[in-house]
């Protein structure tokens, strides 16, 4: 199981390096486990890039992590408060782990953007150039989110 999960972490980084957004990369690497085909996973996660619509809010990789937790632990009955609480607990635990590893779960903070830069952000997607990849820590954040989820699945599998 460890090798398969490590391959998924690497696949997430590969998606990012192919030009997909952070959220897309994390979700697509695990989507087949939940019966989602690649194209549908990429579409569902598309709007979360750049910190949700490039507004630099919650990191896209972290948003992908939340989506995966929902797929793994989410309740399916509206009145299932115990199920909701369980899912929220896992989200909070894994997002705290992400925050500890990356300093923040907020895209702008991770990128070191402040006030004016954040406020004037554009919806236009950034060109993926060698310079882009040098300046951005995003591939590492994708790897971190995918690894946190892979580790969660591995620990869960051992406990079952």
Image (cartoon, grey):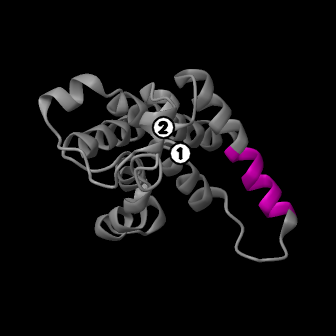
Q: Are marks 1 and 2 in contact (CB under 8 Å)?
A: yes
Quarter of the view holding residue 134: top left
Q: How many marks?
A: 2
In this rendering, position of residue 129 left or right of residue 71: left
Residue 86 is a magenta residue = yes
Question: Taken as a whole, is the magenta stretch helix, strand or loop?
Answer: helix
User: Considering only vertical position in the picture, is 106 above or below 73?
Assistant: above
Label whose residue precedes the other's in the sequence (1 or 2): 1
- For the point 53% across and 41% down, the residue is 149
The extreme left residue here reads 130
Tell me the crowding category of disc 1: few under 14, some 14 to 19, or many 20 or more residues within 10 angstroms, Cα based.
Answer: some
Question: Which of the pair 2/15 is nearer the observer?
Answer: 15
Q: Residue 31, image x and y in percent?
A: 41, 59
Q: Residue 91, image x and y in percent?
A: 68, 46
Callout 1: helix, strand or loop? Answer: loop
User: Considering only vertical position in the picture, is 98 above or below 160?
Assistant: above
Question: Which of the pair 10/93 is nearer the observer?
Answer: 93
Q: Magenta stretch: give its range.
A: 82-91
Determine which of the numbered discs, if any, sits on residue 107 in the image.
Answer: 2
Q: Is residue 146 visible?
A: no
User: Considering only vertical position in the picture, is 87 above or below 41?
Assistant: above
């Amino acid at each position: 199981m460890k090798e398969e999960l490590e391959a998924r972490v690497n696949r997430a980084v590969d998606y990012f390096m192919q030009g997909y957004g952070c959220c897309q990369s994390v979700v697509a690497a695990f989507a087949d486990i939940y019966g989602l085909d690649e194209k549908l996973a990429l579409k569902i996660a598309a709007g979360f890039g750049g910190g949700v619509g490039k507004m630099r809010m919650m990191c896209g990789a972290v948003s992908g992590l939340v989506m995966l937790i929902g797929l793994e632990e989410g309740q399916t009955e509206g009145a299932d408060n115990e199920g909701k609480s369980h899912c929220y607990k896992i989200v909070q635990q894994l997002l705290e782990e992400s925050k500890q590893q990356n300093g923040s779960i907020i895209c702008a903070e991770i990128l070191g953007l402040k006030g004016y830069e954040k406020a004037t952000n554009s919806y236009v997607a950034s060109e993926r150039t060698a310079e882009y990849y040098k300046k951005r820590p995003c591939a590492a954040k994708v790897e971190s989110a995918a690894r946190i989820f892979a580790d969660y699945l591995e620990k869960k599998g051992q406990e079952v």
